[in-house]
Image: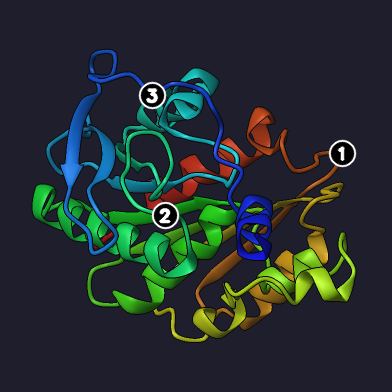
Amino acid sequence: MIDALARQMTYPAPSVRVPSPPPSPLREVAIASEAGEVSAWWLPPSAPDGPVVLMLHGNGENLETMRLSGLLEDLAGLGAGVLAIDYPGYGRSAGVPSERSLVAAAESAWRWLCDAAPSSPRLVVGWSLGAAVAVQVAARHVDTVDAAILLSPWDTLHGVASRFFPSFVVGLLSDRYDSVAAAALVRCPTLVVHGERDDIIPVELGERLFQALPEPKRWVAIPTVGHNDLLAHPGPWREIGDFLAAVRP
């Protein structure tokens, strides 16, 4: 029961139904992972050598909520191909969510993306929980990750949880998501974007992660913006567009 409580705190998967197949032009992809079959949607880039992105969502999202928010369409509008996945236990993906299973699923998706777009610049992009997974992918695949974009990231999961829960509750969390430790191993250009009024993952936690990243890197703090409204603001999209345009493999 204690484990179930901690898991629900970390992985509140939404009840929004994920359709199969997805609406055109998205293509449904099944990716094998040690955690079970990963459900993914793929939208190729508009140009054969255009950038491609592995998109990793937050802990309260799934593929359909991303589509409904316009996120996938916005990335495609910048000329990027997009591979978006649902974590184990989310949407149509098999398995149980945990740090190990999420990272394994993302790594399997990354290998799929490299095979699908061998001549394209390849980026890993994550928001909130997805940023914690994305930095681990970037740290583990330094030879194939051309760039990373981390949106509303944290330093460690315990660092976030300790701001909302007493220490005995934080101690229930078996997952660590130590993004600072992973950041030291990253070898690609990185863009970090955070809302200055984020009351879920405070901006100083994102700054700590940024400080641990090697150069080249760029820090962007968006005034008057919080957590859930970060990508509703034009500022991050201007930064993402410029960053995508500058990436070379």
Say above or below: 109 vs 217: above
Identify which residue is drawn at 80% across, 51% down: 200
The percent coordinates of residue 231 (x first, y second) are 63, 35
Q: In which quarter of the image is residue 48?
A: top left
Q: Residues within 10 Å of mark 3 (few under 14, many from 20)?
A: some
Q: How far apart are marks 1 and 2 (CA)?
A: 36 Å
Q: Is residue 92 shown above or below 94? A: above
Q: Which is more foreground, mark 3 or mark 2? A: 2
Question: Would you identify the image quadrant in which residue 102 lies?
Answer: bottom left
Q: Dot 1 lies on which element? A: loop
* Image depth: mark 1 or mark 2 in front: 2
Which residue is at 56% across, 46% downward? 58
Label 3, on which residue?
A: 18
| Visible residue check, residue 58 | yes
Assign the C terminus to one quadrant of the image. bottom left
The residue lying toward the viewer, choosing from 122 and 161, is: 161
Q: Position of residue 50 (x, y in %)?
A: 22, 41
State if disc 2 and disc 1 touch (CB < 8 Å).
Answer: no
Q: Is mark 3 on a helix, strand or loop?
A: loop
Residue kind at label 1, given as amino acid type: Thr
Any part of residue 188 in sight: no
The answer for how far apart the CA atoms under marks 3 and 2 are is 17 Å
Q: What residue type is labelled 3?
A: Val
Amino acid type indicated by mark 2: Val
Frontmost residue, 171 versus 107: 171
